[in-house]
């Protein structure tokens, strides 16, 4: 029998109380590879922050949309990362991402989280 987990948790360690951030970047033409590289340089900063659970970087098949989905334990953890000194060295990369197209930022609280077997 597998070990039991709290009802509100998944194998990834996330719970139904997690804070999610979606950065959606869209462009009228395919996204330049340098935009993806800029995002890839920012990701390790997130990974080192307290409260960080994980992220997904998604690139649409038409190459005109990128979605960065970040998962945090709390909204406060996300906000502390944004204001932290660790973010300064990659701020230029982050600004390049925002300059590459139209950015929409949405935040969510989890209500349920499931994973396959």
Image (cartoon, rainbow, N blue to C red):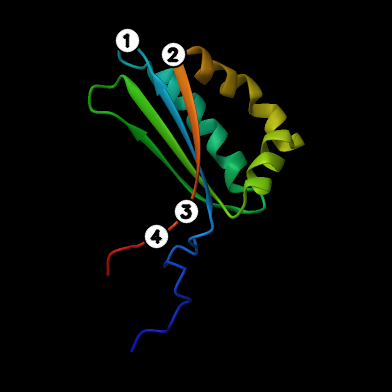
The residue at which mark 4 appears reads as: 113
Q: Residue at x 47, y 24 (%)?
A: 104
Q: Residues within 10 Å of mark 1 (few under 14, many from 20)?
A: few
Disc on res. 110: 3
From the image, state whether disc 2 or disc 3 is nearer to you: 3
**Disc 2 to disc 1, C-alpha distance:** 8 Å
Disc on res. 65: none
User: In this view, which residue lies farthest toward the right?
Assistant: 85
User: In this view, which residue lies farthest toward the bottom?
Assistant: 1
**Disc 2 to disc 3, C-alpha distance:** 28 Å
Q: Quadrant of residue 92?
A: top right
Q: In screen coordinates, is 59 left or right of 76? A: left
**Disc 1 to disc 4, C-alpha distance:** 33 Å
Give the mark nearer the N terminus: 2 vs 4: 2
Does the residue at mark 1 contact the one at mark 4 (Cβ under 8 Å)? no
Image spot of residue 106 (x, y percent): 49, 33
The residue at which mark 2 appears reads as: 101
**Vertical comparison of 23 with 51: above or below:** above
Q: Residues within 10 Å of mark 4 (few under 14, many from 20)?
A: some
Q: Residue at x 28, y 64 (%)?
A: 116
Does the residue at mark 2 contact the one at mark 1 (Cβ under 8 Å)? yes
Q: Nearer the viewer, residue 38 or 78?
A: 78
Does the residue at mark 3 contact the one at mark 4 (Cβ under 8 Å)? yes
Q: Quadrant of residue 44?
A: top right
Give the mark nearer the N terminus: 1 vs 4: 1
Q: Nearer the viewer, residue 42 or 7?
A: 7
**Disc 3 to disc 1, C-alpha distance:** 31 Å
Q: Residue at x 39, y 60 (%)?
A: 113
């Amino acid at each position: 029998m597998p070990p039991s987990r709290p009802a509100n948790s998944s194998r990834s360690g996330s719970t139904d109380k997690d804070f999610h951030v979606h950065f959606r970047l869209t462009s009228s033409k395919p996204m330049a590879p340098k935009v993806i590289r800029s995002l890839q340089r920012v990701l390790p900063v997130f990974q080192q922050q307290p409260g960080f659970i994980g992220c997904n970087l998604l690139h649409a098949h038409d190459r005109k949309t990128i979605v960065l989905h970040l998962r945090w334990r709390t909204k406060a953890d996300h906000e502390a990362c944004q204001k932290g000194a660790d973010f300064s060295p990659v701020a230029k990369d982050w600004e390049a991402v925002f300059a590459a197209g139209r950015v929409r930022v949405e935040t969510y609280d989890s209500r349920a989280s499931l994973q396959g077997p």
